[in-house]
Every structure is written in structure tokens, then in C-alpha cells.
Image: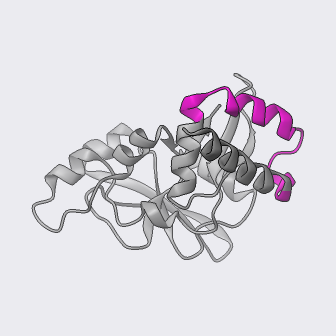
Amino acid sequence: MQPQHTDDLLQTLQVRFETNMQRHQGLSWDEVRDRVSSNPAALHALAAMEASGGEPDVIGRDEASSRIAFCDCVPETPAGRRSICFDGAALRARKEHKPRTSAMEMAAEMGIELLTEAQYRALQELGEFDRKTSSWIATPPDIRKLGGALFCDRRYGKVFVYHNGADSYYAARGFRGLLYV
């Protein structure tokens, strides 16, 4: 990344970090900045998250590894990551009206992961997300083997987990990413 682009990204992340302190109590911006700025892969991933509308922010620290967790915190699923099926196998299986890519392929290109159900539920403890959209989540292999995939949203003040064919895609469904630094 160009130095100016890196500085702009770090400034954006700092403003978001300082505006939403309830998401990451006990962490300092100096620690986050030092960890991110010394990691080119993390900078690339965060820039991709930002460019696709994810508004990434720190949501805590993994206790086992002490890595800092970033997640898309935009209120609705990132606009630049909607209308995509679940994974590459589902994309290849579609005979017509194929979406441009899949959630798993896009996440891999960005250097991030899809949230698990537990991670999605933990994110919802920090705010209200996906009240009008939905997000693909990591799907257990036994469900995927049968052609399905899982997604979540928040309706009626509750978080719901649903299933759909992995090859389905909708204008209001995308995915939220997670990055550990």
C-alpha cells in the first residue's frame, strides 16, 4: 500500500475506534495501530474491508492468542459484498444467472474469514446488525456436503440462523468478515 493510503486507512480506523469504545474495552488505539501498521497483510485486508463498505472496527481480543479481532461493523451487510452465493462449488454448480463471485472466495481474496455462528452472535452483543439484510456464516461441513449453507440476521430483537441452498443469492445477503491481527 502507498504510505498516504496507509495513513488514510489508519486515520479512518482510529476515528471509528475512538467513536465506538464500547466495542473494545481494555484496548488502546496505540496497541492496535502498532500491531496493524507492522502487518502488511492486515493492512491489505482492512483496506479491502473498508473499500467494500464493511466499516471494520476492533471487537475485542482473542484470549488464547492475544490477537486483536476486527470485524465489519457497518449496520447492514457490506454493500460491496452482496448478491453472492456461499462458495466456489455453489458458484460453479449454477447453470444460469451466476453471481459474480461467492462469499468464501471473496473472503479468501480479501484475507479475512466468514464469522461462525458464535462469532456472529457475539457481534450482535455489541450492537444491532443486519436488521434489513442477512449474512452468510461459516457452515459446518456436514451441512455443506448436503448442498446447504447457513446465514444469520437480526429481526424482532433476536438473532436468527437459517439455511438455504449454497448456490442461492439475494440482493440483501452478503457476508461479514473477521480478521485477527
Q: Which of the two residues, 173 or 36, is positioned nearer the viewer here?
A: 36
Work out which quarter of the rendered image holds the C terminus and state it: top right
Residue 154 % position (x, y): 60, 69
* Residue at x 69% of width, y 32% of height: 37
Q: Is residue 124 above or below residue 45?
A: below
52, 122: nearer the viewer:
52
Q: Nearer the viewer, residue 42 or 125?
A: 42
- In the displayed structure, 116 sits above or below 131; it is above
Residue lying at 85% horizontally and 35% vertically, measured from the top left = 30
Whether residue 162 is visible here, answered yes or no, is: no
Please identify the dominant SS of the magenta region: helix
Q: Residue furthest top?
A: 65
Residue 163 x, y percent position in the rendering: 39, 60
Q: Quadrant of residue 41?
A: top right
Q: Which residue is farthest left?
A: 95
Q: Is residue 24 magenta?
A: yes
Can I make out residue 125 in this image?
Answer: yes
Q: Is residue 55 above or below residue 67?
A: below
Magenta segment boundaries in residue numbering: 19-42
* Residue visible at 48% across and 67% down in the picture: 79
Q: Is residue 95 left or right of residue 165?
A: left
